[in-house]
Image (spheres, helix red, strand yellow):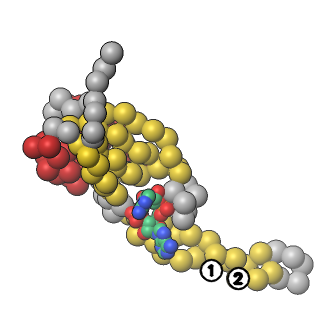
Amino acid sequence: MKLIIANVQDADADTATSNLTGKGYRVTRIGSTGGFLRQGNTTLLVGVEDHQVEAVVQILESSCQRRMRYVPMATGTTPNGMNLYNYIEVEVGGATIFVLNVDHFEQV
Ligand code: 2BA
């Protein structure tokens, strides 16, 4: 058995969850925050049999889009103390996926 941990953008979380549960996969959603952008994203946990991993990855791939984000980087201050910003462009997503071996699974 495998545990798939997928970090997706909030904008894709509903679509990804619906597409997974619609195919019979069980999903846990956790609200999370990216360490770089410090913006909210969503972590999905999906427990599956080994042979189902590829299908889940394909669903995530088709459910999640790449998007550009513009991140303000402070570059200095004006004489009256206002911050000056440059914006850097960052491409985020579709999904960041980890597949872990599960040693033991049971529901009691
Ligand atoms: P964040 O850490 O907020 O990163 C958002 C996006 O910023 C990343 O998109 C990447 O394009 C960029 N980025 C991240 N760290 C960077 C750096 N040191 N320098 C330049 N650009 C950087 P994604 O790669 O698609 O990642 C989206 C989110 O997935 C991440 O949000 C984080 O929450 C998670 N993630 C990505 N890789 C991870 C990893 N190896 N371990 C744990 N979480 C990860």
Image-quadrant location for residue 104: top left
Task: Judge by depth and name the residue closer to the eye, 101 or 71.
Answer: 101
The residue sitting at the front extreme is 103
Marker count (numbered): 2
Q: Is residue 53 left or right of residue 46?
A: left
**Image vertical order of residue 6 relative to residue 93, above or below:** above
Residue 44 location (% of width, % of height): 36, 42
Crowd tier of the residue under label 1, counting other residues whose Cα lies within 10 Å: few below 14, some 14–19, many 20 or above = few
Q: Quadrant of the N terminus?
A: top left
Residue drawn at point x = 18 percent, y = 29 percent: 24
- Name the kind of residue labelled 1 in the image: Asn
- Name the kind of residue labelled 2 in the image: Thr
Q: Which residue is identified by label 1?
A: 86
What is the secondary structure assignment of the residue under circle 2?
Answer: strand
Q: Is residue 11 left or right of residue 80?
A: left
Residue 41 location (% of width, % of height): 47, 49
**Image vertical order of residue 89 relative to residue 36, above or below:** below
Q: Which mark is residue 75?
A: 2
The residue sitting at the left extreme is 51
Separation of marks 2 and 1 at Cα, in angstroms: 7 Å
